[in-house]
Amino acid sequence: MHNLLRFRIATCAFFFMQGIIFSTWTTRIADVRTMLGLSEADLGSILFGLPLGQLITMPVSGYLVSKFTSKKCILAGSLMYPLSLLLINSAQGLWSLFACLVCLGICANVNNIAINTQAVSVQNLGEKAIMGTFHGTWSLGCFCGGWLTMLLMKLNIGITQHFYLTICYSLITIAIFWWLLLDSDSKKDDSSSDDGKTRGMFSPTPFILMLGVVAFGSMSCEGTMFDWSVIYFRDVVKTPNDISNYGYIAFMSMMALGRFLSDIFVRRFGPIRVLQLSGIIITSGMILAVLLPQISTAVLGFFLVGLGVSSVVPICYSATAKSRRMPTSVAIATVCSIGFIGFLLGPPVIGFIADATSLRVSFALMACIGLLVTIIAPFLRIRL
């Protein structure tokens, strides 16, 4: 039990650090746009750099983690991820920023796959699901990162100093907690199915594919909140710069709280009902922020979106163990990949739609994507 607690604390520390790093970028997107004089269409274009970096390294990251273990890859990823922020700070134009975001995506993906693999291995050592807690810690890191950005902006501390501060924090986390991680990854459930035929990442079963689509719907909205919440409050809600993070913080605080409570919700109501309700809450929050773009109602809407997305990904990751024809590790990688396509491609699409119409219209369309969670959830009932 002592070792399990040690592994959980160390893994949570790296999830928290990952959230801090990610929020450092997302809460400074508006400042980067202003610094380089980018239009909404330009911003939408360069935001494709991050998903491109993630997607081209998705299979490679899985291979590296399986070959060198998640612990070693966490060390490499946790060093490269924050250091790649300095590349963004040195960008001089549209395409140089795009290239920097590709590098950021590559580093982020290695870090993400390694940390989630470590989390699954730690969870397999115990007797109950704890994935919600790990993801809640990541959300808590993003939430704290949002508050930190707002504090630094009030103190007139610029992007460069902010990035260096994040790097220093990351190095301290690595020095303290990396040694406490689980050395070898669990091979539990990595067995063949009853008929001896297993599926790979590029030939998922219908069940895993549906889980991926559910994750896609939720994470598309999640990515939109990360990349566009500050801009939405500045341009649509018309808030001053020093409080433009209110929507982001509202979203992150409720998502963090919901993820810490997600395991309780699932035990009480069952995963299908939680997924169906989550989709409805996501859509309701988006529509509220679109129809009533005042500070109070927009904050409430973003609160609801955070609550709605909080339980979806932990449920999807846990449900991969129900797959009969795919090893659990492969199933998790597949669902993660499909979900992150939505997470990473959603924000750039928002930029193009906003440039052609308006930011409110693009948010309204994203509300429809959130309904995918509610629509597809009943089809998972046969396994859940």
Image (cartoon, grey):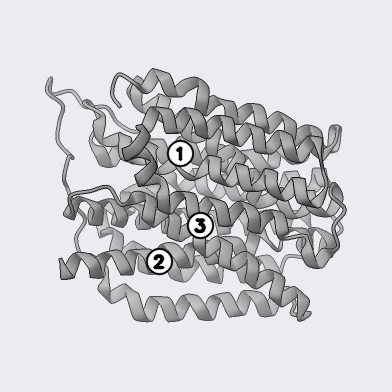
Q: Is residue 340 above or below residue 382?
A: below
> x, y (%) of residue 135?
42, 53
Marks 3, 2: nearer the viewer: 3
Q: Earlier in the sequence, mark 2 or mark 1?
A: 2
Q: Which residue is mark 2?
A: 14
What is the C-alpha distance between the residues marked 3 and 1? 13 Å
Q: Which residue is mark 3?
A: 139
Q: Is residue 323 left or right of residue 296?
A: left
Q: Earlier in the sequence, mark 3 or mark 1?
A: 3
Marks 2, 1: nearer the viewer: 1
Seen at 77% across and 60% down, the residue is 244
What is the C-alpha distance between the residues marked 3 and 2? 12 Å
What is the C-alpha distance between the residues marked 2 and 1? 21 Å
Q: Is residue 257 left or right of residue 371?
A: left
Q: Residues within 10 Å of mark 1 (few under 14, many from 20)?
A: many
Query: Are dots 2 and 1 in contact, CB under 8 Å?
Result: no
Q: Which residue is mark 1?
A: 312
Q: Amino acid at mark 1?
A: Val
Q: Earlier in the sequence, mark 3 or mark 2?
A: 2
Q: Quadrant of the C terminus?
A: top left
Residue 11 placement: quadrant: bottom left
Residue 330 placement: quadrant: top left
Seen at 67% across and 33% down, the residue is 366
Residue 205 seen: yes
Who is closer to the viewer here, 232 or 253?
253
